[in-house]
Image: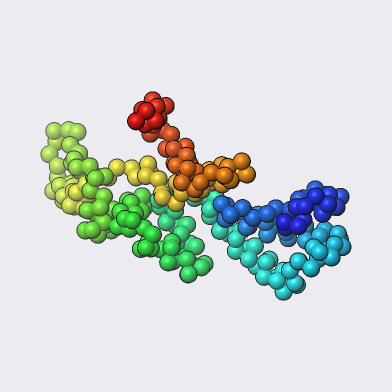
Amino acid sequence: MKKLGNLLPAARLRRLTHLTAITRNVTRWSSTYAMLKRYVAIRGFVYQLNDRTILSLLPTDEQDKDIDILLGILGELESGTKDLQAEDSTILDARNLFDETILLYPDAAKRLGPNADILVSPNFESAVTKLLNNAAGQLTAVERESVCGLQMNFLATQNPSDKPLTLAERAKKRKKTSHEEFNYLDCRFLRPTSNMCERFFSLAKLALTDHRRAMTPQNFEQQMFLKVNNWLWYVSDLVKAMSK
């Protein structure tokens, strides 16, 4: 694809199709999917160029079959990646998406499983997932402790009238109170880590252009974190930090 991006091959390819070659971006894993998808789309036109240098670099028929299979897999993962970046994505949505991915690709459980090593607070995420799924009664003792900060003391509803409750009504009320000792905050405001990471990576891949190649990784990382967390600081804070 890099060869097809050169001046002469690109001009010859443009005579055959409006599609241009796409190269892989190291800061954007989805660019691998875009590159392979574009290759499959222009594969027939590339053979029409009759350029020996380019033809010698083309995959074999067997490799082309493998590329078609890989493209289908990457297409599914690409759709999941975009869903993770949705503004209304919740921890439950991310968990359901990861579980579905694990069913298709069991090897992904090492990184996407509910107890993956990458998780900082697996009990908290598991508890929030159950709360969002209206399954607070299934919380374990450890999970309940992890979300104690989200609890609201359960207040038994008062009888609107002065009429005393019947025996059956008191029994139902007692049963409900025993199973719902606490109410919990609406956990939809908690953003999944995967959502924030995907948004951050998308922002980084757009910012890391040829004009910023000379920046050190440390400076680039600091600027990106300042950009993402711009709601936490003001220009006055920056002036104070620079004056020290």
Residue 161 in picture, x, y percent from top left: 17, 33
Q: Most extreme residue toward the front, as rendered?
A: 244
- Camera-side residue: 195 or 179? 195
Q: Is residue 172 visible?
A: no
In the shown orientation, is residue 185 left or right of residue 198? Answer: left
Location of the N terminus (image quadrant):
bottom right
Residue 88 in picture, x, y percent from top left: 46, 43
Q: Please name the residue shown 23% across and 58% down the image.
A: 142
Q: Please name the residue shown 44% across and 37% down the image.
A: 226
In the shown orientation, is residue 80 left or right of residue 37? Answer: left
In the shown orientation, is residue 172 left or right of residue 215? Answer: left
Q: Is residue 164 visible?
A: yes
- Camera-side residue: 240 or 88? 240
Q: Please name the residue shown 19% across and 33% down the image.
A: 160
Q: Height in image: 2 above or below 238?
A: below
Q: Please name the residue shown 46% across and 46% down the image.
A: 218
Q: Quadrant of residue 229?
A: top left
Q: Height in image: 213 above or below 143?
A: above
- Camera-side residue: 191 or 52? 52
